[in-house]
Amino acid sequence: MRRKRPTVVCLAAALALTGCSAASTGGAKGGSALTYLTFETPSLTATFWNTSIASAEKKVPGVTVKKIVAPSTDRDAYAKQLQASGQFPDLLQSITPSTFATAGLLKPYDQKWVNANFLLPLGNAYKGKVYIPPTNSQIIPEVFYDKKLFAKAHIAQPPKTWAEFMSVCAKLKAAGVTPVELGGGDPFSASMPLTGILSADVLGKNPNWLKERYAGKVKFTDPDVKAAVGKYRTMVKNGYFEDGALGVKYADSITNFTSGKTAMYMMGSWFLGAVPKDHADDFGAFLTPTEDGSLVVPFSVGGSMAISAKTKDPAKATAFAEAWSLDPANYKALIEGDGAFPMLKGKTLDDYGVNVTKVFKDSYSYVTQQNTKVSSFGWATNDDSMPSGLNNAFYAASQALYSSDDVDGQLAKLDAAWDSATK
């Protein structure tokens, strides 16, 4: 399988981050000093990172870890800056392995250790090697919905087919309810509807599409991709997003949806961490509908930290990374705060001592069930990950396609960017 990158977890790539800073959590004196690139969000705070680092330090005598906080959501770009200045970290959280492994900058994990501890050992493997442990997963996106607003529009159940989805949107609009929330002001957030539609329609029919794009067998300008993008343009033209959606920031889109201003929200499953606890039962979730109603899960296996191939103490770096990646306390924070689906072997949700909502459990069932899982389009960290820079090009195209009918032109730009990135 991906998520993006999704976070300790792929998802965190999507969340608003704080400014760059560096801090040491303390630890053993006179031993190995390691640097660790992390990020901070409202749910994965500085306190979370400091506590988790200190816990792992205790399990690896003689190691001290200095935290470096990425200044933006683009950790890959920041890691490249650090590398260019000779400051490439010993450990890096939630980066895209393919971006750095091809340059020989990452050390793979021992496959025996990975096999022994995780449900999908090769879930985020790149060219047969695991560079970030497959600790958790995400569905990117799900379609979250407000049950009260559905009832207001006399909608009895969530749609299964695309035609039903369009009918639901029309009924909501007719009832004076904005059908779909879109945080179009942030590029990654603007891309969520297209990510869902492309994952369902293109990858659902051809799970190898991204690999075939590398081989030059398919293109963004092909009819199936154009048809999928056409669905998104129909949503825009029919007024199914709120007015001024391109000016709505990601954080505001969460508030808009949870406060009942819009009926549906296409977002990564990390949104589960933001579901209001005082009325959590008002929310449900379904997958981006397909033409025939078949279920396609846009799946991403996330992971914890990558290990630099240049670290001066690979043994200590590996021991720290393994200790952090298996710490149940970290999973509890990720599950409750970031909506991460844990992927440790031999564990149930109860084993983590978490308090989660019904919509979380319903969403997690897509992960545990036998169904059609495809790599979430643009969020994979495995062999389906897009070339370096293509995610940003895809996000930009998503924003442009909100207000432009030039589908052919935007898709041609993506093909050109892909070809340039893979020369």
Image (cartoon, helix red, strand yellow):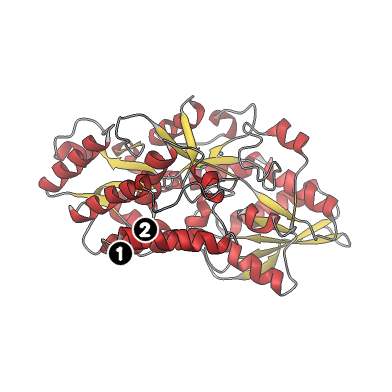
User: Furthest-bottom residue in view?
Assistant: 85
Q: Which residue matches tag 2?
A: 190
Establish if 60 lies above or below 326. below
Residue at 51%, 28% (x, y): give it. 368
Q: Residues within 10 Å of mark 1 (few under 14, many from 20)?
A: many
Q: Residue 363: which quarter of the image? A: top left
**Disc number for residue 410:** none
Q: What amino acid type is highlighted by mark number 2?
A: Ala
165 or 208: nearer the eye? 208
Q: Quadrant of the C terminus?
A: bottom right
> Is residue 127 visible to the viewer in this orientation of the structure?
yes
- Give the side of residue 255 with respect to residue 390, left or right: left
Q: Is residue 263 above or below residue 100?
A: above
| In contact (CB < 8 Å): disc 1 and disc 2 | yes
Give the residue at x 71% y 60%. 103
Q: Is residue 341 left or right of residue 296?
A: right
Mark 1 belongs to which amino acid? Leu
Q: Residues within 10 Å of mark 2 (few under 14, many from 20)?
A: many
- Residue 25 in the figure: left or right of residue 417: right
Q: Residue furthest top?
A: 370
Real-space Cα distance between discs 1 and 2?
A: 8 Å
Residue 258, position as x, y percentages in the image = 31, 49
Instruction: State the quadrant of the N terminus.
Output: top right
Q: Which residue is mark 1?
A: 246
Q: Point out residue 332 in the picture as x, y percentages from the top left corner.
A: 57, 41
- Return the residue nearer the eye: 411 or 364: 411
Q: Residue at the spot x=79%, y=53% of the render?
A: 317
Q: Is residue 31 left or right of residue 224?
A: right
Circle 1 sits in a helix, a strand or a loop, which is it?
Answer: helix
Query: Going 29% across and 55% down the picture, which residue do you hit?
Result: 256
Q: Is residue 261 in view?
A: no
